[in-house]
Each structure stands twice: as C-alpha cells, then as structure tokens.
C-alpha cells in the first residue's frame, strides 16, 4: 500500500551545524506534505508544509525540498540547536486531511 | 487558548476490557482525527469526525469506534482490548477545509 518512509532512523549533528532529514514517499497522487516534530511525551508539532506544485518552501531556520520525480522530501534545519533534538516525521496528506506518517528520524544534537 | 486537550493522560486496562478516551479540540476547530502511535513508530490514522459523523477511517477493526459531540469534542472507544492495543492515542483537531492539524499530548494506554 501507499506509505511514507524515512532513510535514516537516527541522525547525530553537532550544535550549530545544519541538519538534513530525508524522506521517501510512494504515493504519486499525494498533493500535500508535512514535517512534524515530536518531543518526548508530547504530540507531534507542525513544522512546515509544502504542496505538490512547489519544490521548495522556507520557514524560520527550516527549509523543505520536494522532488516529485524521485518522490523524495527533505527537511533542512539551519544552525541546529539542542532544542531541535526530537523525532521528526514526514507525512503525506490526501483529501479530507487524513495524514499518513512515516516511521520517524531521531535527531540528536551534540552540544 | 488551551489547544487540544486529551484525557486521561495514562490508563491501564486488562485484556478484554473496554476503554473510552476523550478529546477537546482547539478553539475554533470542528474536525477531530484520532491516531494510534505504537512505541518507536509513526502515528497511524484511525478515523476522523466532522459534523458528528465519521468521515474517514483507517485500517482499524470495528472494535475501534468513536463519537463527536455538538461542541466538537470527541471520544474514542476500544472494545475487547488486546495487548497489541497498547499505544499512545493521539487526537488532532483542525478547521474545516484547513490541512494543518494540531495534536494533543496523547493518552498512553497500557493493556495487561
């Protein structure tokens, strides 16, 4: 079935460096992609989203890139901080706001 | 604005029992979705309620049912609990026609 998955389960980054978290999706009909951050003991928190008619979108310290040709999504975090340590999920949304999550990547920031 | 709230925070049940989890959406939101998140996994969509009706459903058995009230709050009911139902149950709310969902902190259910 359709799924959204991640390449790396754990990513360790030095504080101040940039982080890149990758994601592959399989549903070519997906038209909306979201990145969520989940800290321990909390629900997922919306970070940034991108529609399928775009290939790049920037937020505060974060950038999402979408490559529909290879069904690839990435999240770039600039100047990674200790507070960025969390599990990051990419997700896909079709109609009626149903969201399909991947398995997640744990980001560890080394002080 | 209190955001999305869920109760209880933690719950321990025995196999075969039934459980009810509750969710209050963020102010101004009328759509509620429920997700199950097993340890180390991403959330899995259970179902979504809008205008007091189930609008979409994921791949979950009929043991999982829900309800939405006129004030948009929602309940998730699980019957005949199995050990495999142990998970974090997340509620997310959104406004109609808006894609962005706001998640609550979840209810941790343990089935023994």
Image (cartoon, coloured by chain):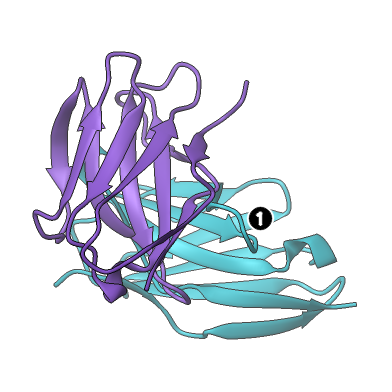
Chain colours: A cyan, B purple
Q: Is residue B50 above or below residue B60?
A: above
Q: Chain of mark 1?
A: A
Q: Nearer the viewer, residue A89 or B65?
A: B65
Where B55 sits versus B78, above or below? above
Figure quadrant of the C terminus of chain B? bottom left
Q: SS of the residue at dot 1?
A: strand
Q: Position of residue B58 (x, y in %)?
A: 17, 55
Pinpoint residue B24: horizontal percent, then vertical percent.
Answer: 44, 28
- x 27%, y 14%: residue: B70
Q: Position of residue A85 (x, y in %)?
A: 72, 68
Q: Is residue B77 left or right of residue B39?
A: left
Question: Which residue lies at the image location 53% right of the left edge and 53% below the top edge?
Answer: A44
- Residue A29 visible, this angle: yes
The quadrant where residue A37 appears: bottom right
| Extreme residue toward the right, this view | A111
Q: In the rendering, at what x and y percent does residue B82 appear?
A: 24, 70
The quadrant holding residue A88 is bottom right
Identify the residue position indicated by label 1 in the image: A62
Q: Is A56 on the left or on the right of A4, as rendered?
A: right
Judge by depth and name the residue closer to the eye, B73 or A64.
Answer: B73
| Front in this rendered view, residue A55 or A78 | A78
Badge 1 density bin: few <14, some 14–19, many ≥20, Cα 10 Å: some
Q: Residue at x 63, y 65 (%)?
A: A76
Q: Quadrant of the N terminus of chain B?
A: top right
Q: How many discs mark residues in the rendered view?
A: 1
Q: Inspect this view and state whether residue A81 appears.
A: no
Identity of the residue drawn at 32% across and 75% down: A70
């Amino acid at each position: 079935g359709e799924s959204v998955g991640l390449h790396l389960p754990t990513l360790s980054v030095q504080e101040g460096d940039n982080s890149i978290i990758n994601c592959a999706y399989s549903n070519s009909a997906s038209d909306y992609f979201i990145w969520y951050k989940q800290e321990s003991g909390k629900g997922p928190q919306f970070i940034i989203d991108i529609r399928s008619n775009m290939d790049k979108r920037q937020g505060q310290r974060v950038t999402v890139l979408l490559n529909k040709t290879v069904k690839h999504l990435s999240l770039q975090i600039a100047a990674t901080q200790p507070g960025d340590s969390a599990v990051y999920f990419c997700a896909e949304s079709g109609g009626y706001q149903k969201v399909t999550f991947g398995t997640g990547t744990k980001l560890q920031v080394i002080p | 604005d209190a955001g999305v709230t869920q109760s209880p925070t933690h719950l321990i049940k025995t196999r075969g029992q039934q459980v009810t989890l509750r969710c209050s959406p963020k102010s101004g939101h009328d759509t509620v979705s429920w997700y199950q998140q097993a340890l180390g996994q991403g959330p899995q969509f259970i179902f979504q309620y809008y205008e007091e009706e189930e609008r979409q459903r994921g791949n979950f058995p009929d043991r999982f049912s829900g309800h939405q009230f006129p004030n948009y709050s929602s309940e998730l009911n699980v019957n005949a609990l199995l050990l495999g139902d142990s998970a974090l149950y997340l509620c997310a709310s959104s406004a109609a026609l808006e894609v962005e969902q706001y998640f609550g902190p979840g209810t941790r259910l343990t089935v023994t």
